[in-house]
Image (tube, rainbow, N blue to C red):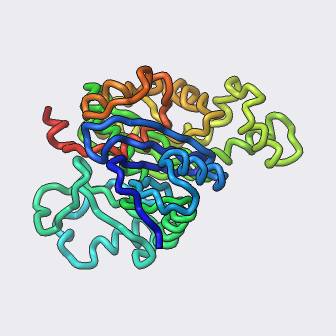
Amino acid sequence: MFSFSKKPEAFFIEINEETALMARTSSSKAPFVIEETKEAPAGDEAAVQQAVKELVGKKSGSGYAHARCGIHPARRLIRRMSVDLKRVKEPGYFHEVCTQQFRIETDKYTIAVLNSVDGTDYETAKATAEKEVVFVGAHNDELLAAQQHLLALGVFPERLELGTVAMLGALADYHAFAELKTPTLVLEMDAGNTQSFIINAGGLDVSRAIPHGLDAMTSVVQKELSLKDEESARKLFYSNTFDFTNMGGLLIRKLLKELQSLIGFYEVQTGQSIGQVFCPQLPSKLIWLEATIAKEVGVEPLKLDFSNWLKSRGITFASPTPSSDFDAKWLGVFSLMLYYDAVAATKK
């Protein structure tokens, strides 16, 4: 039988396509101190297991590390939409939306419907005025696989969250904290797709899946550099041994076309202009893509002040100079630590 630690520390882990990020804190609820962090390549299971052991200080075979976990299933669903208030109380209405608009089989997914402003559960019994909702969920097979993978890593998921949803909630909170005046374009880029969002202190305004990811750029690299195959192009693209910044406009041409359409429609509908771009999950050797996208869109990358923002939430770092130690990708694991009232923050 496994034995479980009774220590007051809390553990957090987020795993995306590229990286596993972990943190140990002095407690599970603020105020607390982030005592130590670890990072390992997501595809290197041995490295992740070792990082978990080092972080929690457990010996081999001593049990699981209980943790709050963020995952990014490939078939995750995050879609904001306006519901029909005349039909929202019909038993089959949400099923119809999922099958006809999102093209998913609801019996194979775990899905929740949330209020777009504060992320609370949408209550159809009280649906008399609020029609803006967010459908969130993931394919059941991928949720099960994620749980099994975490257990294989030595992690017992006390709480399992869609990392994207936690990140968007944290970013809305950051907007309120920093008093940002303009919305942010958020891009989660993986190999095959880009999940795009527009968010501000009032919550999630727009969500759209774009069928162009990082792999779409490797075919451009192959063509422009006359490489023999896409695998060679991919290795070069991810190696950081070649300066692709001058080729940036060509690499993101297909993606940019979709983004310009998204932004143009949003600005016409709302009268608001995008103020900054944020790409939280880029591989470390492709960080330069964020600046390239921001330049093409005509804005600046969003720079997060982790130290002061988290301090306002009762979370501090053991390190005296944390700001220089953490880049954008750490927002995901930090977002798992937060408890907040988005409505109160927005009103404030």
Q: Residue at x 49, y 22 (%)?
A: 324
Q: Residue at x 20, y 69 (%)?
A: 88
Front-most of residues 117 and 223? 117
- Give the quarter of the image for residue 78: bottom left
Q: Can residue 275 be seen in this view?
A: no
**Residue 292 in the image, given as x and y percentages of width and height:** 58, 27
Q: Quadrant of residue 173?
A: top left
Above/below status of 70 relative to 343:
below
- Which of these two is toward me, 264 or 302? 302
Q: Position of residue 159 (x, y in %)?
A: 36, 59
Q: Nearer the viewer, residue 291 or 343?
A: 343
Quadrant for the C terminus in the image: top left
Question: Within the image, what quadrant is residue 322 found in?
Answer: top left
Give how far across and how far down residue 249 sits, in percent: 64, 30
Q: At 46% from the left edge and 45% from the top edge, which residue is drawn?
A: 196
Asked whether residue 297 appears in the rendered view, the answer is yes
